[in-house]
Every structure is written in structure tokens, then in C-alpha cells.
Amino acid sequence: MLRTTQVRRWVLYGLMALGALSLATWAITRETLPPVIRIAAAEKGGLYYSLATSMKPHLAKKTGKRVVVLDTQGTLENEKLLHAGRADLAILQAGAVSMEGLSALAGLYPDVIQVIVRKSSQMESIRDLAGRRVVLGSSHSGYRKSATTLLDHYSIDVSKLRETNRYFGELLSDPSLDAAIVTTGFLNPDLHKLLGTGRFKILPILDAEALAVHYAYFQPITIPRALFKGNPPVPKDPIPTVATVAFLAARKDVPHLLVTAALHAIYKCGLRLKLPIIMAEKEAAKWSLYPLHPASMDYYNPYRSIGILANFVESIAGIKELLFAFFAGVYLLWSRWERFQRKEQEKELSIQKERLDIFLGETARIERAQMETSDPKLLRSHFDEITRIKLEALQLFTDETLRSKSLFTLFLAQCANLTRKLEYKLNLVLSDSDARKPREQPKT
């Protein structure tokens, strides 16, 4: 039968086990930063690589970890590196990847499509690219995806273009290349180096509004006059085009500490002074092409957790009656269980009292019997019997409540008194017996 003390002990053990389990769960699931933080960027000389390199010292200082920037072929390779666990952060081009298993951390800057041709080529529109040697970038780059989308809109067969799988910077060293379709930020160092020569021009994308209608990741944008230094400057007039967004991404299981540190490196360390095209923090907070990581949402909106807490409190208030009924039910069940336990204890105590009455009756019987005899054998038998009854009672009556009762004390006193009487009477009878024995006469 369960005792209240046993139940309390089990509850205590349960709470201790729960505490140990919670501690073990915290130790297993707590967030830890990787020993080396790897940022997948793009080819050296590009804007992705330049941005990642600018973030590197601030991220290292904030986390206390070594930071490595990986030069890659671009967005598609970066996505694979994230999934394979070989990169912790990556800069990706919106619209070029599926984002399955990944989270966006921050929109960074507009990635602008720029159709660059040689001035000597006499090409004036995008349709003039058909059949030419046009650089579209590596098959693992995001700007190749943008380029093929643009060409498809103008019904240009990519398979009929030549020398496409190269880097746009090679236009400077290979005069056989006619053009390049580049998707990058305005401050790309290699782009400025190329257009600063004065040998190239940018073709307008006159269907920019239509492209933005068909593709959610495109938005119309204008390349400002004289963006690229030269003589004459390039472009000589504002040019319409479209842009997507370069953004920082990571796996969904990225530690919140790393997300916060990366955003700190972007917004709190003067990075916009070096790269002014980076979105302001408020603007990035509104970027919604992909769902943001929870840590990013907390960073952009520090009061978000308070709002969640307020909703939680409101929910608790809404179900307070249900909670009250639940706890009241638990209390009633506990009270009934305790009453049942008390009844069971009282029943057992009553049974033991009845048995104690029997033992008291036995001692009274022995008391009367010893008064009517002086036979040493019977007295010894009564002595042994009263000792047996006492030992049997001590073994049987284990309940502390019964042992504390006056009836049990009376029983023990009865046994003790009877034992002393038997000892005294037995000693007296034996002494009389020894005194009556005839003494041997001494021989003369």
C-alpha cells in the first residue's frame, strides 16, 4: 500500500530526474559557434568577395572565432556548400536558388543586370546578341541564371551563343569576346575596371517593367549617368534595367548567436561607409522575398519577443477558467486519494488493534494460570510463552501509530510485569525445593 511519505518521496525523485533531464537537454541543445566560421562568397575581385572580406574582421572580433572567406564560382556553388556543411554563411542571388533548408538572414544590396558590349561591335539592342560570343558566367553562378532568364524573355537561344561559360573580366584580355551579361552590384571592382577603359557600353533593358511583372525577384532600376568613371563617362545617359537582390543566407539550424554577430558586422561596424549600396537596416528589415531567420527578425525588431509574450499572456488569460478547473480537479483527486489512504490505514490499524486485544487476552490467561501453579515446568512453559507472545507482537505491529498508542504500551508493561512475576516465582519455588532436600549425614 502506498504511503503519503512514499508518494512525496517519488514526487521529489521525479522532480530531481526532471531537473537532471532538463540540464542534460540544455547541454546537448545549447547553441555553440563553429570553431571556424566560413563565408562562401564568389570569385576574388567580385563584390560578393569584397563584401565578405569586409565583414571578416568584425565577425571575428564579435565571435572570437577564426573567419575564412571562400572564393567560389557563385550562388549555386554557395548553396551546395551550405547544404554540405562546408560553409556557415553565404552570399546568394535572389531567384537563383530554391532556399529549401535555408534561411535568409539579410538583404544586402541590389544585384543589377548589366548588358555590356564593345563599342566597336555596333550592337544597339539585346536581340543583337544572338549568335555572338557572350559571356554569361560560370554554370555555378547566380548571374548566369539571371542572364538566361533575360535571354529567354527576348527569345534568344542560349545554346547558339558562344564562349558563354567564362568570367566577364576576360573581356579585357580576350578581344574575341563580344559582350557579357553581368548581374552584380554597382560597386563591383572588376566591373569598374572594365567599364573605366571606355571601350564598352551598357545596353538598355527596355522591357524592365514587364520582366518585374513576370518574375517576383526582379524590380525595375535605373543605372545612373556617369556611374563608371571614364572619358566619356559610362553610361552617358541613365539606362533602364532590372535588378534582383544579393542577400546573406545560412542553413535553418544556424546558431542564433552567429546570425546576430553577422548582422552586427553588417550594420554596426561602418560597413555602409565602405560599400554605400548596402541596404540600411530599416530597409533590410522590410525585405520580404524570402522569410527571414527568427534571429534576424529578433534583431530587426527587438520588441518582437515582448509581443510574443503579450500574446502568450493573453492566451493564458483566455484559458484561465480551464486551468482553474484542471487544478481544482487535480486537488480533488489528491484529496480523495489521501482520504482513501487514511481509511486504509485506519482499517489496518483496527485489524492490528483486534490482534493486540487477542495478545492481551493471552497474557491475561497466562497471568491467571501462573497464579494457580507452583510447578517449575509449568512456570518455565508460561515464561517461554509470554516471551514468544511479546516477540510476535513486536514483529507484527510495525505501524508507528499503533506503537504510540497507550494500549500497546499497556501490553508491553503487562508482558514485563508478568515476566518478572514468573522469574520471581520460579526462583522462589526452586529455592524451596533445594531447602527441602535431605542433607547427607556425615560418616563416622
Image (cartoon, rainbow, N blue to C red):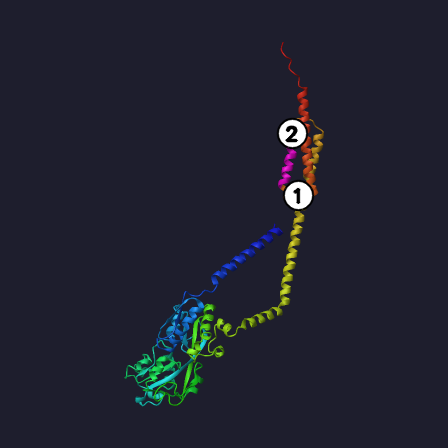
Image-based side of 439 in relation to 191, left or right: right
Which residue is label 1 attached to?
Answer: 403
User: Which part of the image, by quadrant, shows the C terminus?
Assistant: top right
In magenta, the rendered stretch is: 379-395
Q: Residues within 10 Å of mark 1 (few under 14, many from 20)?
A: few
382 drawn magenta: yes
Q: Residue type at mark 1? A: Arg
Residue in the image at 65% along x and 62% along y: 328
User: In the picture provided, is 166 more to the left or to the right than 97?
Assistant: left
> Where on the picture, by quarter, is residue 253?
bottom left
Q: Are marks 1 and 2 in contact (CB under 8 Å)?
A: no
Q: Quadrant of residue 125?
A: bottom left
Residue 102: % across, % down: 44, 72
Residue drawn where x is 65% and y is 37% of the image: 390
Instruction: Find the distance from the CA under tag 1 to the CA under tag 2.
Output: 28 Å
Q: Main secondary structure of the magenta part?
A: helix
69 or 398, which is in the foreground? 69
Q: Is residue 99 visible?
A: no
| The stretch drawn in magenta includes residue 236 | no
User: Is disc 2 placed on a helix, strand or loop?
Assistant: helix
Q: Quadrant of residue 183?
A: bottom left
Residue 71 place in picture, x, y as percent? 35, 73
Q: Where is mark 2, residue-wise?
A: 380
At label 2, which amino acid type do we have?
Arg
- x and y, in percent, of residue 78 in the image: 38, 73
| Left or right: 9 as drawn, with respect to 54 | right
Helix, strand or loop for disc 1:
helix
